[in-house]
Image (tube, rainbow, N blue to C red):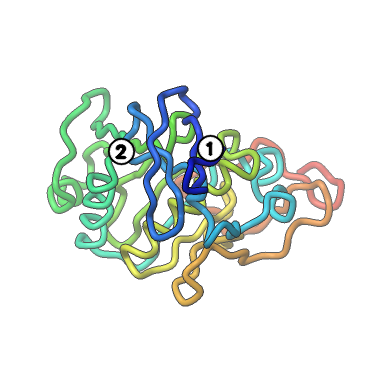
Amino acid sequence: MLDESGRVIEVTPSGYPPRQVDLGGCPYVLGQGNGGALGLGAGQHGGVADLLWDDVSCFFDPDLMGSLPDVRVPNTSVEDWQAVLDLVAEKGWKCQYSEGEAVLPVPRAEGVLSRPADAECPDLRVWLSADVLTIFRFRAADEVDFDVDLRELQGQERLDVFCGFLREIGRRLGKPVLMDPQGDYGHPVLGFDVEADRVALLADPQVSDRRVHRPHRRPDLPPPDLIVVDGIDL
């Protein structure tokens, strides 16, 4: 709906009363449950979406791509990790840092990334909205690494939320943010383009309903349960 000035205002997914915030012509709607939640318009430039759902829906099909794709920023540093943590705090996104079963205050990046090699990998859960969760994994300083669940990213509205989040990270770091299919590390299908300042496709949409097998699977992730190539179950 529109307010008296013609700006977009909407109720958040969780049902909290809305609050309009105008950020350079790109309206965000904030709810009490997550003050910095990415809302309507988050993945858009002047009301135009970075990606259109009908054009990219195949890249968000859990059966085709795996439900948990890898999203990453390559060639990073401890300082870049800290910039991401600062961004989460500045935006007021609801988050939870944990080491194993222990939930702890969010530490400095330097402390997390200097833990012993045999220590359990901590994670930081960040809610982009009430229904969209990302999980950062502190595996190494040289790559900012997080997971999303494609089952939570269905439809144009949630695609816009996701694109807005990639833009926020890419702009803060001044680096590309890439999404690889699950188990297909190094073959991004979309990502934030620094020069274009938007999220763009990096691969052609799939033209057939099948999984594509490539040999460069990331060694620390299990392979998909089923791989189909040219109609043959492998």
The reply to whether residue 70 is in sight is no
Q: Could you tell me residue 79's position as x and y percent?
A: 20, 62
Q: Is tag 1's residue or tag 2's residue first in the polypeptide sequence?
A: 2
Tell me which residue sits at (43%, 45%) in the image.
28
Q: Quadrant of the N terminus?
A: top right
Tell me which residue sits at (41%, 24%) in the image.
16
**Dot 2: within a 10 Å radius of its alpha carbon, few (fewer than 14), some, or many (20 or more) residues?**
many
The quadrant in which residue 124 appears is top left
The answer to whether residue 72 is above or below residue 69 is: below
User: Which SS class for mark 2?
Assistant: strand
Q: Could you tell me residue 6's position as x and y percent?
A: 52, 48
> Is 72 or 92 nearer to us in this picture?
92
Tell me which residue sits at (22%, 47%) in the image.
117
- The kind of residue on which mark 1 rests is Asp
Return the residue at label 2. 123
**Dot 1: within a 10 Å radius of its alpha carbon, few (fewer than 14), some, or many (20 or more) residues?**
some
> Is 66 or 148 nearer to us in this picture?
148
- The kind of residue on which mark 2 rests is Asp
The answer to whether residue 72 is above or below residue 38 is: below
The answer to whether residue 183 is above or below residue 194 is: above
Tag in front: 1 or 2 = 1
User: Which SS class for mark 1?
Assistant: loop
> Is 183 or 156 nearer to us in this picture?
156
For marks 1 and 2, give the CA distance.
15 Å
> Is 219 or 168 nearer to us in this picture?
168
Q: Quadrant of the C terminus?
A: top right
| View extreme (right): residue | 231
Return the residue at label 1. 149
Q: Could you tell me residue 25's position as x and y percent?
A: 44, 58
Q: In the image, is 187 to the left or to the right of 194? A: right
Q: Could you tell me residue 176's position as x and y percent?
A: 44, 67
